[in-house]
Image (cartoon, rainbow, N blue to C red):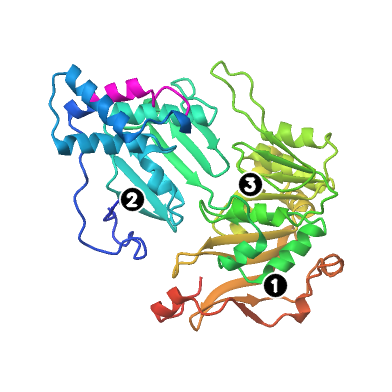
Amino acid sequence: MQKLPKLLPAAQPGATSTRAIASVNFKPRRPGLSTTLVTILHEVHREIGFLSREFDEELIPTEEEVSAIIERASARFGIELSSAERDELLEHVEKDQRLFGILQSLVDDPSISDIIVTNYSKISIQQSRKNLTTDLSFPSQETYEAFVEKLLLRAGTTYSTKRPISDGMIGSYARVHIVHKSICESGPYLTIRLNRFSTVSISDLVSAGLGPKPLFEYLQALVRAGLTVLIVGEVGTGKTTLVRALSSTIPTDESILVIEDTPEIKLEHPHVRYVSTREANSDGAGRVSPSECIRGGMRMAMNRIIFGEIRDAEAAEAFVDVCASGHPGLSTIHARSAKEAMTRLELFLGRAQRGVVRAVVNEQIVTAVHVVVFVSICKMTGKRRIINVQEIGPVSEGLVRHRDMFRYQVRNHLPTWNVQCKISAHRDLIEEGRSPSVLSSLTEVLNLGIDKDIEMAGRSVEL
């Protein structure tokens, strides 16, 4: 049976998760292997070849074969192992056989969104945006660095002192971000973001409590009608997952272009193409910018554009330009509210277009972006929720007007969404077709039923 790692008390007060930590009786952090055992382990690795070849299920030796290899390695060094030491080495070798080595148990835990490794002996996780330290440890710094190199190989990328930061995907569910030890304190720093939905539908998100069905029907109607939706939130709030679910609404006779720096969005659609941006190589050549991909997409006979994340002025200008030209899109941006997202977008465009007055920038925004959806973590339950939905525009007295459509709050132990406005600026578009959204038919308050976490808290809070 796979042994799960223990979670140690967080360093900061209030940073623990009651769902993740069931007991206060923690064992101290397990130390790494002794120098002698590390030496034997390296010899075992060299013989088996775990650290130098691609993972191959058929080449994994049996426990008996590994035991024999350990005995041969220890004999070469003239060392007699105790039963406990032999078992410890066997445990490490068994973990190395897995795709993610000693981190596999964390990868398999559906409650964990991120795995953060600072050095060989410090491994943390994130659950509901809260950081917790585990008792896991690599045998040595050398073993850890070899593990990182293996992950880079699997992700089809590399790093060095000339290119110290690298991103890649392993399969469709694990994004790895690695920082070379030459530019960090201990390092290398490894962060693994885990995508828990190989495929995702709107019904999945309703079941997960992200929002009620009528709210999603409204968003689906917007996307189906060809309007641009911007998903806003902080890291790990489910922005990309929501983009993937809404993309399933795009009619099957339209062509989609997906542009990302690290490929994460995979769609089940008959007409979808994927383009990746690229950083310059160590010689400063070969960069493919977001704006180049977006503008190139306008020559690719595409109907829709899905842009992974707006991170800078160049990307913001290109995305706004292509959407304003009649190509509806979906994208994400980091911000702590819908209002802050508009401010960031305004600042990006201001940097990209020096000297342009604010009113002109705002006109560009409202021409391109129609709806902003803010997602965040509910402070009471730790669950991802759609917090606010706003329709954008028009510009009045040089400022962008916002119309609140839905807003989340916890009321009487219920996660509820207040229908703030029942008249959409896009009413004619969203009330047409096979699956219309008629806001006027909705009740004032939508909910998902009693939430056990809220019920246990026994109080109300509004975000």
Of residues 380 and 48, the one nearer the viewer is 48
The reply to whether residue 356 is in sight is no
SS under mark 1: helix
Of residues 391 and 276, the one nearer the viewer is 276
Judged by depth in the image, the label closer to the viewer, 3 or 2, is 2
Q: CA distance from mark 3 to mark 1?
A: 33 Å
The local crowd at label 2, few if under 14, some if 14 to 19, many if 20 or more residues have their Cα within 10 Å, is few
Q: Label 1 belongs to which residue? A: 214
Q: Label 2 belongs to which residue? A: 1
Judged by depth in the image, the label closer to the viewer, 3 or 1, is 1
Residue 405, percent across and down? Answer: 69, 71
Q: Earlier in the sequence, mark 3 or mark 2?
A: 2
CB atoms of marks 3 and 1 within 8 Å: no
SS under mark 2: loop
CB atoms of marks 3 and 2 within 8 Å: no
Q: Label 3 belongs to which residue? A: 347
The amino acid pointed to by label 2 is Met
Q: CA distance from mark 1 to mark 2?
A: 43 Å
Q: How many numbered discs, if any?
A: 3
Q: Is residue 32 left or right of residue 288?
A: left
Residue 325 belongs to magenta span: no
